[in-house]
Image (cartoon, rainbow, N blue to C red):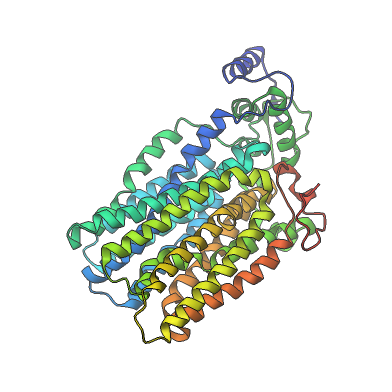
């Protein structure tokens, strides 16, 4: 082992950092949200805003591209699905890149890919070129889905991790709202120009984030994985409220990586396998301990149910669903989807303040229960409409209100809790690539839903499709009841949490 001891000059630097950041010498925490940690997570969450914008704007862009390029429903489904198919290699590449090159570099790379895809798609004079740009955007989506929650979880202190790690989800919803608003306003431009402006807008925030990330800190957990303990200590002093809290977090991270917790050296040689994450997937799937196996099942499960529960179909095909109720004017269709975006933003603000108070599992359960009831309501409404010969007005208002309530239930619980939960439960040695596996499952299930939704509702009716989603959410409700609570626990303590058996229906916080 090679090491460099901390010099007196470096100690003075650490003391200066502590004073500048307002760190208290004694006590674990003064109860305040650390401003530097908050600013770092907010900046990184810009990539989630771009992702949300791209997903939402496609709901309108698909309508206009179909008319402009004269494509059929199958081509529309392929265009919608390929965005998420191409996110799959993006997810896996992001996991490896973040382990090899760091979390900051991965965020910067995702911004570059977003900009390239947006420019190419906006230029697209033909379906083939539009599809190519769309696929590049898909890779960027895969990067964004991995790196924003990963960076946020590793920067955040345990007491505010639910709040901070849910900021990327809030940012996604803000991006969704911007996307729907963009659809509404740019729809008024000429057909060829309007949708191209919609898809090129992500270039500006992507370039801004590249500049910001050059000035922000790297994840302290990644730094320790590289043996750069001294640098990690400096970062932790910036993102912790007390010196004792910073040292305690550093001690736990060193123990998780396999470095002696009492080691005071700044540079520590760690195995290459630890630095690069090599072999993590093999160990995760082939030789997991019982707690790690349970973590893997829980993380994959929450991502699978998030997508097969049907919310992706509501977000992407909202205009088509509203059109089935009798709304035919394009401006009105775009305006109703703005309401979906506004609902998501409002309930996202609520969720970030309750995640650390009521816990993840309670929100999962309440959210799934609400989605079962609302999907049943939509199914009944659509079934009545499909078998009725009268052109009633009430189904329009009923469908709009119930869809907004459905989106609210999802956004306050399953939406943010899925990302917070999966980002925090993996042990450090598996975290980046474990999250990559989860997001890959997320994208696969999302692609299945989005590319089959139109075909399925044409076979079993729209009402039958909503009844199917209700049944799936009943299964999700049972699954969420089996999950252990992670509120207030350190990232390094998750294997202990998942080593305990939690009875179904017991919603008390894990000890």
At x 67%, y 44%, the residue is 357
Residue 232 position, x and y percent, is 63, 30
Depth order, front residue of 40/388: 388
Q: Quadrant of residue 23?
A: top right
Depth order, front residue of 503/381: 381
Q: Quadrant of residue 156?
A: top right
At x 19%, y 61%, the residue is 192
Residue 140 position, x and y percent, is 43, 53
Q: How many marks?
A: 0
**Residue 284 seen by the camera:** yes
Residue 401 position, x and y percent, is 45, 63
Locate residue 137 relative to residue 411 in the image: left or right.
left
Locate residue 327 relative to residue 417 in the image: left or right.
left
Locate residue 147 relative to residue 127 in the image: left or right.
right
State whether residue 285 is above or below residue 118: below
State whether residue 186 is above or below residue 204: below
Q: Which quarter shows the N terminus?
A: top right
**Residue 120 seen by the camera:** no
Residue at the limit of the structure toward the left, as seen here: 190
State whether residue 128 is above or below residue 262: below
State whether residue 264 is above or below residue 401: above
Residue 113 position, x and y percent, is 39, 50
Locate residue 1 relative to residue 450 in the image: left or right.
right
Depth order, front residue of 250/69: 69
């Amino acid at each position: 082992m090679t090491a460099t001891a901390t010099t007196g000059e470096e100690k003075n630097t650490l003391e200066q950092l502590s004073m500048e950041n307002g760190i208290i010498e004694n006590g674990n925490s003064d109860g305040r949200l650390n401003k530097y940690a908050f600013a770092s997570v907010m900046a990184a969450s810009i990539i989630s805003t771009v992702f949300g914008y791209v997903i939402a704007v496609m709901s309108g862009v698909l309508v206009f591209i179909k008319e402009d390029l004269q494509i059929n429903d199958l081509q529309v489904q392929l265009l919608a699905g390929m965005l998420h198919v191409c996110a799959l290699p993006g997810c896996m590449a992001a996991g490896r890149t973040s382990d090899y090159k760091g979390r900051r570099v991965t965020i910067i790379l995702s911004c570059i890919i977003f900009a390239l895809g947006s420019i190419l798609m906006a230029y697209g004079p033909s379906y083939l070129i539009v599809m190519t740009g769309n696929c590049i955007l898909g890779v960027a989506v895969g990067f964004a889905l991995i790196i924003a929650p990963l960076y946020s979880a590793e920067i955040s202190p345990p007491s505010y991790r639910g709040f901070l790690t849910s900021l990327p989800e809030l940012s996604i919803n803000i991006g969704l709202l911007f996307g729907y608003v963009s659809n509404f306003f740019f729809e008024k431009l000429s057909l060829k120009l309007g949708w191209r402006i919609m898809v090129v807008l992500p270039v500006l925030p992507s370039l801004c984030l590249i500049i910001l990330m050059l000035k922000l800190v790297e994840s302290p957990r990644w730094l320790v994985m590289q043996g750069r303990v001294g640098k990690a200590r400096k970062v932790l002093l910036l993102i912790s409220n007390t010196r004792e809290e910073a040292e305690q977090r550093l001690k736990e991270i060193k123990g998780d990586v396999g470095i002696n917790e009492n080691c005071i050296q700044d540079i520590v040689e760690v195995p290459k396998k630890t630095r690069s994450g090599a072999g993590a997937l093999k160990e995760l799937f082939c030789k997991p301990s019982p707690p790690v196996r349970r973590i893997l099942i829980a993380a994959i499960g929450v991502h699978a149910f998030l997508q097969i529960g049907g919310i992706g179909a509501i977000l992407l095909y909202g205009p088509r669903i509203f059109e089935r109720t009798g709304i035919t004017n394009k401006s009105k269709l775009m305006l109703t989807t703005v309401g979906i975006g506004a609902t998501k933003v409002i309930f996202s603000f609520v969720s970030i303040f309750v995640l650390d108070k009521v816990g993840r599992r309670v929100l999962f359960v309440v959210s799934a229960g609400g989605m079962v009831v609302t999907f049943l309501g939509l199914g009944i409404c659509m079934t009545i409409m499909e078998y009725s010969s009268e052109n009633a007005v009430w189904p329009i208002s009923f469908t709009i209100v119930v869809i907004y309530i459905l989106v609210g239930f999802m956004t306050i619980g399953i939406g943010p809790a899925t990302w917070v939960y999966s980002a925090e439960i993996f042990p450090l040695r598996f975290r980046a690539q474990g999250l990559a596996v989860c997001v890959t499952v997320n994208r696969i299930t999302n692609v299945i839903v989005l590319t089959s939704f139109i075909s399925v509702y044409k076979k079993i009716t729209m009402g039958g499709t909503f009844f199917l989603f209700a049944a799936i959410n009943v299964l999700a409700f049972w699954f969420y009841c089996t999950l252990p609570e992670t509120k207030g626990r350190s990232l390094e303590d998750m294997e202990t949490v998942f080593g305990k058996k939690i009875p179904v229906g017991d919603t008390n916080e894990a000890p």
